[in-house]
Each structure stands twice: as structure tokens, then as C-alpha cells.
Image (cartoon, rainbow, N blue to C red):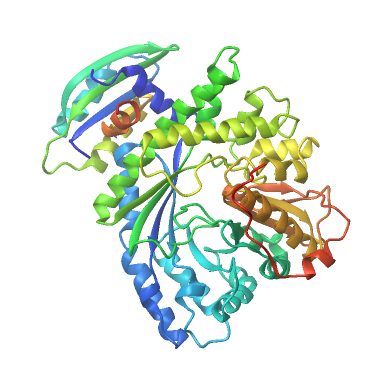
């Protein structure tokens, strides 16, 4: 693990307020958005964020739980994964 | 974004839809410093050593699973072959050692512990024989303990005395676990050229050339390979090979990342990454399905051996490019009961024991998780083992036999083991006797390594 950056993916059907509610959970954990992109893949709303977590006193498990719970109430799937999971697979 | 969104979604798709997983993080632990003439003291020593070394294994592995969002299915331990570590114990049998291993595995919260093993490819010591004779009761009285016996290598040939003995041990193990369709045999592997760093069960043990403690990782992903092939439009076999290589590369990278991070956090050396396409009973997570995606109507049809050869070779090439630590078995597994496509192929009459034997000459392991009639004679089991060992010895590769003579079952019946072990239709064996051949004993000499035709 080389950083405290995470890839956050939100997958599900589009509706009003997804970005607002997901990002407010991030703000409450002091997680900063570095980059954000959204697209419709095969009719499914997909938002991908590169986010930076604070270096100290960051509780990953609690953050993942809060994000996943917020996703559930919105009817979308939210995943928080360390960026290395993608960097390692696709970059040498 | 510096990582392409399509790549991110590809990775997520592999996990969500195609069953990509880290099959196992296996901690290898040396028990060579635990020897003691008193088996009680030996048992205390190994319990202490295993539970101390593996104390943080499961917690750390679970943390890594959440960090990367990649499922890690099993956490396992492998230990020095018990026949070596317990050689000096004066006790006439080693069953209590298996029970201690089981207890240590349960207290460490791991799924399996391997290493109730002996290496007898040239001959057996007193300790080896004590261990082998303890196998049936050991597997009957434990849940998590796996056992393996190496009876042949390319350098030494095939120890036919051991092969003969193992036929009887398999029968006894099946009989002792008759109430559970002979499940004891699902935890027992007979090897030729056994790898010392394999993280997969039931054959994992911590070889005598290994360090004090090591982390080995087994990655799997037949579903991912299958999906990648299915996406190609009317491909030729060169294109299929290329796609398998690229997919294997990606899967391997994921395993390497996980293995290195687990070992860094535990402060334990990273050993190897075993890239094996290990199927599960889940639909689509099947090696047979990959072969069928290449164009065979059913796995077992003529052409299956060629298709499997292509698959196995491409997996190794992709894996070797992705990591310098590829080891263990690394290839395609073809366990019948654990692969929905194999089970279907057997039921449809497309796949026989003979065809499976041919397939094992080009794939990574051998006759794996095959259920045969309960009245199969021990000598026939030994002869099946001898055939498989010969394929491994002559081809300088690992081969193995994990066969279950299911008590009271006949061809047409099936057995249900549950979980990752799946279910298996009973396959017919030859009714002609091999008894005189097996009873001769002795050693089939090591093969010549030149004049290879």
C-alpha cells in the first residue's frame, strides 16, 4: 500500500441526490475528492471517484460501512477500494 | 482520472459477476524445532508454534479483503510434513497430532490445515509408516486437517510399495467416514512430484526447503477467463490463447498485490503466488465451461485434451509475466465434484475416467475429487494411482490422485460433500483386476531424461 487514496464506485439506477448524499458522507469523514467521473454503462448509472482519506485517525471500516449504508438507502451499490487494487491489475 | 474508468469497471465486474477471488492465503509454518520423543510434549510444541505464528493471520487477511474489496475465500495453514517433524516421537501412532493440528486450526480460525503428510517417493522411514497408518483415523476424527503422501518423483521413480499401501489407506479412510459418503478421502492426496510451496488443499504442506514462516497465495478465476473468451467474436485459437494470457496476467497481479501486503503487515516473508484456475460449484466458475467456450459441445469430447493444453499453457505464460514469484501448482484444476460443468459432462456421458486421465497429462494436477463405486478393490485404487504417478514422473510434472470410493454407492448414484467440495456422480472403473501387478511391489525406476520420444 503506497497511499491513502481510494477508488469509490457507485453503481445503480440514477436518481436525484445521489452525488449530494454520497459526498456528504465523505465530507463527514474528512475524505477529499481528487477526481470524479460519471457515465451510463449499459443503462446503469456509474459514478467513479478518486478520493483521498486523511493520513491520521481514519477508520476505513467505519467509512466503508457508512458509505455502503447510504448507498443502500439510495438503492445503489457503493464500494470503497484502495487504489492499488486497480493500479496493480492494469498498470505495470 | 489516471486509471481509466473502463478498467475500474472491468475489475469490479470480475469480482461481482465472474467470481474473481483470492482463493486462499496460506501461511506455511516450519515445525522442525518442535521435535520431542514424548508425543504429548510434541503436541504442546506444535500447538504453541502454530497458534503463535498464525495469531494475526485471519484478522490481517480480513483487513486486506476490505481494503481492496477483493474477496479472500479461505485462510489456511500448512506445516512441515508431520512424518518429518514427529519422526522422533516414540508413540506408535500419530492420531493425536492430527487432533492437535485440528485444534490449533480452529483456535486460529483458519479453514484448513495441511501437512499431515509423508514423503516416501524412494522409501519409508518408521515415522513415515506410523503417519501413513494413522491417516484413516486422523481424517475421521478431525475436520480441518488435510493429508498428503508423495509416492513418486521424476528423480527417484515410483515407490510401488507405497502405492500399494495407499490403496488400502484410501479404502480404510472411506470406510471410517462411510456415514458421510467417505468424505475423509476428500482430504487425502497422493502425489508425484509434490510442490513444497503449494497453498491449495488438500495437498498443501510446508516443504523442507522452505523458510521458517512464509505467506503463499492462491488466486483463482475460471469465471473471469470464461467471460473473457465468451466476449470474443468468432475467435481463432491463437486469439483465445492471447486473451487467456492477458486475463491470467490481471488475475496474477491482483494476487501478488494481496500476498505482498499480507506478508508486509504480518512481517512474514512472501513466498509464492499460485495462479490456478480452481473451479467452484457456482455456475460459470467452471474450467469445463472454458473448454466448452472454446467450441467443444461438452467437456470430454475429442479435442478436450488439446483445449486444456492450450488453457494451461496460456495461464502459465500470463502468470509468469505478471509476477516473478509464481510457484506452487499454477495451472488449471479439473476436480470433478467441484466443477458444475465437469459434473454435467460426466452425467451426460461425455467425460470418463479414461479421458480425465488423458487430460491430466497436460493440466496442473490430476485425478481430483473423483467418486468411484464403494466396492472398488484397494488394488484397483492403487493401480489408478500408479497410472497417474507414471504420467507425472515421465512428464516431469506434478500429478495427484484424490479419489473417493464412496461406501455403498454404485454407478448411477452420486455423493454430496457440500461447500467448495460439491457433489459427484459415481464414475465406473475397469472391472478387470490389477491385483497381481500392484502386489509385486518394489520400485518403478526413475525414467531416462533423454531419448524423449
What is the x, y in percent for residue A90?
A: 33, 26
* Residue toward you, B296 or B17: B296
**Residue at screen point 39% across, 33% down:** B321
* Residue toward you, B1 or A12: B1
Q: Is residue A26 left or right of residue B141?
A: left
What is the x, y in percent for residue B435?
A: 83, 65
Which quadrant of the structure image shows residue B37? Answer: bottom left
Instruction: Relative to B229, say whether B336 is above or below.
Output: below
Residue B176 in view in this figure: no
Q: Is residue B183 left or right of residue B40?
A: right
Instruction: Relative to B392, say whether B163 is above or below.
Output: below
What is the x, y in percent for residue A89?
A: 35, 30
What is the x, y in percent for residue A56?
A: 11, 42
**Residue at screen point 61% across, 50% down:** B421
Which quadrant of the structure image shows residue A72? Answer: top left
**Residue at screen point 39% across, 49% down:** B272
**Residue at screen point 37% across, 44% down:** B325
| Total count of labels | 0
Which of the image's four quarters has the N terminus of chain B? top left
Residue B262 in view in this figure: yes
Which of the image's four quarters has the C terminus of chain B? top right
Amino acid at each position: 500500500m503506497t497511499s491513502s487514496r481510494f477508488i469509490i464506485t457507485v453503481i445503480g439506477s440514477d436518481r436525484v441526490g445521489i452525488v449530494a448524499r454520497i459526498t456528504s458522507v465523505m465530507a463527514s469523514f474528512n475524505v477529499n475528492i481528487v477526481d470524479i467521473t460519471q457515465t451510463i454503462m449499459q443503462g446503469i448509472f456509474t459514478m467513479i471517484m478518486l478520493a483521498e482519506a486523511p493520513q491520521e485517525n481514519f477508520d476505513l471500516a467505519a467509512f466503508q460501512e457508512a458509505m455502503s449504508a447510504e448507498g443502500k438507502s439510495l438503492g445503489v451499490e457503493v464500494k470503497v477500494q484502495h487504489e492499488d487494487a486497480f493500479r496493480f491489475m492494469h498498470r505495470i | 482520472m489516471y486509471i481509466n474508468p473502463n478498467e475500474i469497471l472491468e475489475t469490479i465486474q470480475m469480482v461481482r459477476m465472474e467470481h474473481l477471488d483470492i482463493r486462499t492465503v496460506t501461511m506455511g509454518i516450519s515445525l522442525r524445532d518442535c521435535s520431542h520423543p514424548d508425543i504429548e510434549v510434541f503436541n504442546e510444541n506444535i500447538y504453541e508454534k502454530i497458534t503463535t505464528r498464525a495469531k494475526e493471520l485471519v484478522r490481517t487477511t480480513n483487513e486486506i479483503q476490505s481494503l481492496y474489496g477483493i474477496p479472500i475465500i479461505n485462510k489456511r495453514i500448512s506445516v512441515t510434513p508431520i512424518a518429518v517433524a514427529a519422526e522422533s516421537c516414540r508413540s506408535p501412532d500419530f492420531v493425536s497430532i492430527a487432533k492437535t493440528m485440528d485444534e490449533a486450526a480452529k483456535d486460529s480460525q483458519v479453514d484448513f490445515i495441511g501437512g499431515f503428510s509423508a514423503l516416501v517417493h524412494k522409501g519409508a522411514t518408521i515415522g513415515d509408516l506410523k503417519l501413513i497408518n494413522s491417516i484413516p483415523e486422523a481424517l475421521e476424527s478431525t475436520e480441518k486437517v488435510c493429508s498428503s503422501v508423495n509416492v513418486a518423483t521424476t528423480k527417484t521413480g515410483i515407490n510401488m510399495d507405497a502405492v500399494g499401501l495407499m490403496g488400502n489407506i484410501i479404502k480404510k479412510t472411506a470406510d471410517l467416514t462411510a456415514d458421510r459418503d467417505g468424505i475423509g478421502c476428500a482430504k487425502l492426496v497422493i502425489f508425484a512430484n509434490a510442490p513444497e510451496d503449494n497453498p491449495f488443499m488438500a495437498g498443501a504442506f510446508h516443504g523442507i526447503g522452505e523458510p521458517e514462516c512464509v505467506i503463499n497465495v492462491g488466486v483463482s478465476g475460471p469465471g473471469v477467463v470464461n467471460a473473457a473468451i465468451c466476449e470474443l467474436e468468432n475467435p481463432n485459437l491463437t486469439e483465445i490463447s492471447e486473451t487467456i494470457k492477458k486475463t491470467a496476467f490481471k488475475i496474477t497481479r491482483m494476487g501478488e498485490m494481496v500476498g505482498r501486503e499480507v506478508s508486509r503487515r504480518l512481517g512474514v516473508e512472501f513466498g509464492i503466488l499460485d495462479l490456478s484456475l480452481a473451479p467452484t460449484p457456482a455456475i460459470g466458475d467452471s474450467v469445463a465451461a472454458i473448454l466448452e467456450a472454446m467450441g467443444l459441445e461438452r467437456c470430454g469430447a475429442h479435442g478436450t485434451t488439446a483445449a486444456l493444453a492450450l488453457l494451461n499453457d496460456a495461464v502459465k505464460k500470463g502468470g509468469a509475466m505478471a509476477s516473478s514469484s509464481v510457484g506452487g501448482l499454477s495451472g488449471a484444476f479439473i476436480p470433478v465434484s467441484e466443477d458444475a460443468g465437469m459434473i454435467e459432462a460426466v452425467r451426460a456421458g461425455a467425460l470418463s475416467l479414461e479421458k480425465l486421465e488423458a487430460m491430466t497429462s497436460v493440466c496442473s494436477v490430476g485425478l481430483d475429487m473423483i467418486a468411484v463405486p464403494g466396492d472398488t478393490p484397494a488394488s484397483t485404487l492403487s493401480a489408478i494411482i500408479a497410472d497417474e504417478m507414471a504420467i507425472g514422473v515421465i512428464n516431469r510434472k506434478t500429478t495427484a490422485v484424490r479419489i473417493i470410493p464412496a461406501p455403498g454407492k454404485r454407478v448411477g448414484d452420486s455423493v454430496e460433500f457440500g461447500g467448495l467440495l460439491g457433489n459427484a456422480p459415481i464414475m465406473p472403473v475397469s472391472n478387470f483386476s490389477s491385483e497381481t501387478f500392484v502386489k509385486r511391489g518394489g520400485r518403478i525406476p526413475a525414467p531416462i531424461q533423454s531419448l524423449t520420444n
